[in-house]
Every structure is written in C-alpha cells, then in structure tokens.
Image: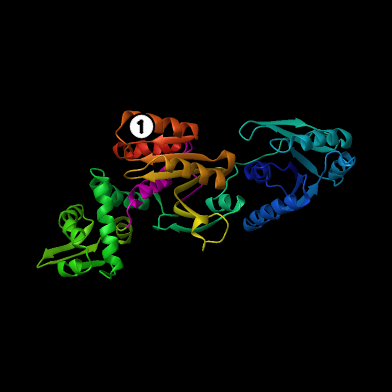
Amino acid sequence: MTVIEVLDKSSVENLYAPLSYSARRVIYIGRDAKETERECRVYRALFAARGMQTEVEAVTVTPGSGREIETLTALFERPDSYLIDLVGGDEALLFLLGRAIESAKPQHALVHYGSMTTHRFLPAGQSPTALPRGHRPYLTVAETVALHGGRIAGATDVGAAGRGHDEICALIADLDAMWEISRGDSAAWNRNADGLAAFEALGCRRGMTFSVSQTFAKEKKRADAYIRLHSFLPRLAAAGLAEDLVMRRGRVSFRYKNRFVHTCLCRAGLLLELKIYLSALLTKGADGKPLFDDAMTGVVLDWDRRTREAASVNEIDVLLTRGMIPIFISCKNGGYDEDELYKLAAVAARFGGRFAKKALVATGMSGSPARDAYFTRRAADLGIRLIPAVHTLSQAEICAALASL
C-alpha cells in the first residue's frame, strides 16, 4: 500500500497513517523542496531504525504554478492500492490533492478523513477497495524527541525497564518505605539527601558502605549535615533501608540496602520522580496490558544537539508515550512556583508538539488559598493538569490519575 500525506507541522499527523497501516511506500507532499526533503530524512531514519522497508518520497507542489494537478495526478501512475490521508496538512495542498484524485480516478484508493481517533474512509477509486486493516501505532520517548529535532542527552536508569510486575513491585516496596519517611516533611528529606550526596562527593562511600567521622564533617564545614544524620539514619534503619548502622565514638557508618535505595537517597527530588515513573510502569489499560508504550525518568533533553551549551539543555522528570501522544510530567516534592508551569509548557511544546499532554505532580501547594487558586487557573490556561497532594494517594489512586492524563 502507498500512503499519500500532505505534510503537517505535526510529526504525529505525518506518521499516524504510515505507522498504522505499515505502508510499503509513503509520499509526502509539501510546498518547499528543502523543507519537505528534510522532513522525509527524519521519517526515513525512523522507519529504518524499526526495520521497516518503507520507501519515502518527497514531492514538491507550488500552488499557482499551473502544474499542480499534473504533478499530483502523476502520483497514481504506479499500479498499487492507495490510502490518501486528508487528516492534517496544508489546506491549499489538500484541496489540490482532492482535484487530482477526481482527475486521476485511481483503480484502488481510499480517502482517510475525520481525525486520528475517529477513522472514516471514503472510496476514491474506480474499483471497490477493502478497508485497510490497521493497528495501534506508537512512538517511543526517544523517537518523539528526535522527531522534534532534539535528542536525549541522559536519563536516570534504576534498572526498572523490562522488569516483570513482581520485580517492579519490589522496587516500589523499597520506594514506599522511603516515601513514608519523606511524606511527613519533604523539605527535611531533601536536605538529608543533599547531605548524603555531599559526603559521598568527599569520598565517604566505598561500594554500598557509607562512613563519615564527626571530625571530618567539621573540617569540611558539614557539621550540620552530620548532626542531622543522627535523627535520619535510625529511621532508615528501622525501615530496612540502612543496614549495619553504627553511630558511636564520633563516627557514623551503614550499608545501603541496594543500589536502587542508594540512588533514591542521594538525589533530592528523585523520590517523587521514581514514584511516578514506577507507577506508570504498573498502570494497565482495560485490556490488562501496560497502558504506556514507553517511559523514562530524569530525561535530559538537548534542544540543539550541542550539550556543551548549558542553555540548550532541559530536564523533564518523567516522560511517557501513550500511542503516539507524549506526556510530560514535572514532579515537585517540596516548594515550587509559577515558573515551573512555564518551563513545563515550553519543553512540552518544543519536544511534543500540539498533541503533547502535560501534568504537574506535587506533594503540596503554597498553603495560601488565593495563591493556589491563581496557580490552578494558570495551569489550566497552559493546558497543564495538576495532581496535588500526591503523597496522600494510594498506589491504585496514583495509577488511576496517570491513566486519566
């Protein structure tokens, strides 16, 4: 089957039909030759990376040139079945394509119209044509970013991808133990995480064993962080997260339960990110299968593929794909302000296009009714879904909230 697409500004629109129907050949029609070929190169790379033997052609049509219908009619010369996608694209070119269909009267052709979620087909050829048997298309997180001209420069890997349900539940059990400690005072949790990370940067960990003396802490001007460990570490030990804890004679030492726990304890703000990320991996659709096609956390997005320029890089806490729709999630386990909304909206627009969904997940709000009401209105204006007080939700409620995005 040959799929004919009039280029849209959205890569999702341009790829939906070709991926849905595993097209052997795709013709993309645009006004500008260089821009059309540039788009085609991106799509060729995506098809090739998936192992699809899809032929991609770029066709340039200039309205008003006098040869538009001739150029478009020639697209139907090859004996084949055609799916002409009229969802999205330049309206003038869509009109001209419609006239070309009338003129060419291809033998086997269907016009696809409606929307990406409401599929309607209209026979456009001389002979009856069976409706194509499509399947649900999807994009990975990396594909989504690449389609919008960026790349993933880094991400947090906690070894959860590809694990089974029981293994993910084991990670969540450790996460929940930390969650219970942090939910009472997220700011204190973040201070302690920063303290552990600072000591480790000074060489206070070997393998999974952490050890620091009071004298060393004072020398490095970390006395306050050392004192806080005396109230923090016993709680970790009681939860089974810190093993072989010793606090005596001016020294503190313990062993992290595992690498996952170590990762969570040494990065402030990571706990909520991982809670949402692992919850997304557990979320199921009505058919009992994973709802999200891909998920990543701590995703560093390079705006212009030059990571040496700090201004070109942003981080998104959790990035999901559901079908071909990306979902950008910002997680705030502590304080945040209105700027977070603008950052989230900007990153989602840059790397997700007009179909991107956005959510801000937080453990609390400002506490001021007037300020919170304003913040909620601004979020709604920017198309951002708020999930506040997430620390009060059960695991099932968090999964339900993610499924509703």
Which residue is at 78% across, 35% downward? 92
Query: Which of these two is toward me, 17 or 231?
Result: 231
Q: Position of residue 327 (x, y in %)?
A: 50, 42
The answer to whether residue 339 is seen in the rendering is yes
Furthest-left residue in view?
Answer: 249
Q: Position of residue 27 (x, y in %)?
A: 76, 47
Q: Is residue 237 above or below residue 319?
A: below
Examine the structure image and report whether residue 230 is included in the region drawn in magenta.
no
Q: Which residues are magenta?
A: 267-296
In terms of secondary structure, where does tag 1 sit? helix
Q: Is disc 1 surrounded by few (<14), some (14 to 19) or many (20+) residues within 10 Å?
A: few
Q: Position of residue 219 (x, y in %)?
A: 20, 69
Q: What is the quadrant of residue 376 in the picture?
A: top left
From the viewer's perspective, tell me whether residue 364 is left or right of residue 352.
Answer: left
Query: Which of these two is toward me, 384 or 342?
Result: 342
From the viewer's perspective, tell me whether residue 404 is left or right of residue 355.
Answer: left
Which residue is at 67% across, 41% downward? 17
Q: What is the quadrant of residue 353 in the picture?
A: top right
Q: Is residue 258 above or below residue 175?
A: below
Examine the structure image and report whether residue 293 is included in the region drawn in magenta.
yes
Given the image, on which type of amino acid does mark 1 rest? Answer: Arg
Per the image, the residue denoted by label 1 is: 371
Q: Position of residue 156 (x, y in %)?
A: 42, 57
Quadrant the N terminus occupies = top right
The answer to whether residue 284 is seen in the rendering is no
From the viewer's perspective, tell me whether residue 122 is left or right of residue 217.
Answer: right
